[in-house]
Image (cartoon, rainbow, N blue to C red):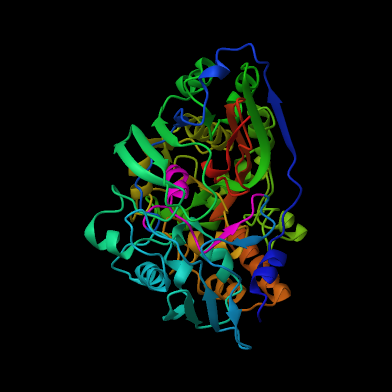
Amino acid sequence: MKNLLKRAAVFTTVLALAGCSSSGSNDGNTDPNTTTADKPFNVVLTTAPVGFSPLTTNDAPSTYVNAQIYETLYRRSMDGSSYEPLLAKSEPDCDEAGTTCTIELQSGVTFHDGTPFNAEAVKYTIERIKDPNYGAARASIASSIEEVNVLDDTHVELKTSYPDGVLIAKLAHANSAIISPTADQAQDLMTQPVGTGPYQFVSAISGSEVKLTRYDGYWGEKPEIKDVTMTVIAETSTAISRLETGEADFLPRVPVNQMNRVKNIANVESVAESSSAITYLALRNNSSVNPKMADLNLRKAIVMAYDPDGYIASVDGYASYSRSIVGPTLFGYTSDAETYGYGYDLEAAKKLVEEGGYADEPIVFLINNRPETIALAEYIQSNLKAAGLNNVTIESLEWAAYLSETQQDNRYDITVLTWSNVTGDGTEMLDPNFHSVNSSKRVRYDNAEFDALVDASKQTLDSAERTAAISAANKMILDDAVAATLYNQYQAYAFNAAYTNVEMDAGGVFYVQNFKLK
C-alpha cells in the first residue's frame, strides 16, 4: 500500500505521441540581441482567463496563468506517463486498507504573501474544495476524502471512504492546487492570486493582460525568465501576426487550420503532436430545449450524421478520431470501445429522421465563439442538414458566458465541449463530465447504473477492476448517444526560436519555469 504513486503511474496508459515540428532560419523579424532573461516573456492567449483561483476556475486560459502561480502536491510528468511529488515530498504512505494515507510535505516553502506552506494549508485547501458553499469547480477531486488531519507542519493524514485508485491523479490536478488560507480569507483570489509557485502575480487588466514576475523566495529551481506578460488577442490571425513581428514569444494554442501558416514563420518553432485532449458533442436527453431530445433515435441520428473524416481533412489532418469518449491515451481505454455507440452512417441517419418525423424539429446548438468552434459547428450543422435535420440553430457566446449558460436548465439541445484529460485517467473523464452528482451538470445524464459504474471505477486499487468499470460506463454513455467524439485533439503551439525547452505536457499545460534561453 506504500507505493500508490508507482501504481498510479502504471494506471496511466500513454501511447507514443506522434509529432511534427519545424523551425525557421535566424534571418527573420526577431533580433536575438534583444532577447534576454530580463526581457518580458510574452505569451499570447486567444481567450481571456476567467479568473485566478485554481479552485473555482476550470478553463484552459485560467490554468495557463494559474500553473505559473500555484502548485499541487503532485504533478503529472511532461510525457504523461507518471506522477511526481511536487509540494509533497514523497508518495502517500497508506495503511493496508488503503483508506488512511499520510503525505509528507516539503519544508521551507512559503506563499507569495510570506505565510508558510504547511499541513494546515493542505487541510484548508481540501476542505474548501469539499465545501459546497465555496463553489469549487472540481469538488469531485475531494469526494473520497472524509477527513484531513494535521499531524505536524510537514505531515498531513487523509482518511478516505474507500481505497481511491485516482487519489494521486486528483491531487495532481490544477484544481487541487494549494492556496494560502490567509490570502483566501483576506482577498478574492480570482483577482488577487497567491500561491507557492515560481511566479507571483503583479497586475491584470480584465480580458486584456496579466503580468507575473519571478518569486525570489521560491523554494525550488529558480526560473531563468524573470517577467511574464500574458496578452489576450482574441483574433487568431492577429495573434499569429505577433509571432511574425517578434512581439509574441509563445502562442500555446494554435488552431490546427493555421499550422501551415505558422510553420512558415522565420525564427519561430512550431509543434503539433497528439494529446490527451478530446472535443466531443454533448446531447442532452433531459433538461434540453426540445423535449424530443429524449428520443434515443433522434440522438442517434445526430451522432450518425457526423462525418469525422471530412472534418479532419478540413484541418489538414491535425487531429485524429476514436469513437471512444475515454480516448486511446487514457487509463481505462480498450480497443473494444471502437465498436461502442454509433459511427458515421448518413443513410441510417436519414432513415431515423424520416421515420421519427424529426426533419423540422428545432434543435438549439449552443457553442462558444472561438472561430474554430464556429467552423466546426457549421460543419456539423451541414452534416445534420444532409441527414434531413433542417432546423438546427447555432447560437454562439463569449467564453465566460458560454461556460455559465451551458450549466443552465433547458438551455441547449446539443453543444461542443472539450476536455483536456490532464490526469490521463478515464474515471476523471467520466466522473466530472457525466456523473449525475459529481459532474459540472452540463450534459445532464441522469443514470444510476452509469453512476454506479463510475463510482466502482475509482473505489479500488485493482487496475483490472478499474478498467472493466470504466469500459462499461464508456459503452453505456456512447450507446445512449448523450456524447460522441468529434475529434481527438492535436496539441499545436509555437514559440520564439530564441528559447528552448518550451513544451506543453500531455494535458496541455505549460510551465514557464522550465523555459530557457538558447
Residue 305 drawn at (x, y percent): 61, 41
Residue 458 percent across, percent down from the top left: 59, 73
Image mark count? 0
For the point 64% across and 57% down, the residue is 326
In percent of width and height, residue 26 lies at 65, 15
Q: Is residue 300 visible?
A: no
Write the residue at 53% across / 74% down.
Answer: 104
Asked if 292 appears above or below 104 in the picture, the reply is above
Residue 57 on the magenta segment: yes
Camera-side residue of 353 and 262:
262
Identify the image quadrant of the C terminus. Answer: top right
Q: Is residue 64 above or below residue 256?
A: below
Residue 62 as seen in the image, left or right of residue 465: left
Q: Is residue 141 magenta?
A: no
Say which of 226 and 279 sits in front. Answer: 226
Residue range corresponding to the magenta coloring: 56-78
In the displayed structure, 511 sits above or below 317; it is: below
Front-most of 368 and 482? 368
Q: Is residue 449 visible?
A: yes
Q: Among all residues in the image, which is located at the extreme left? A: 186
Pick out the residue farthest to the bottom. Answer: 96
* Residue 512 in picture, x, y percent from top left: 52, 41
**What residue is drawn where x is 60% and y is 87%?**
95
Name the image quarter holding the N terminus.
bottom right
| Residue 230, image quadrant | top left
Front residue of 165 and 324: 165
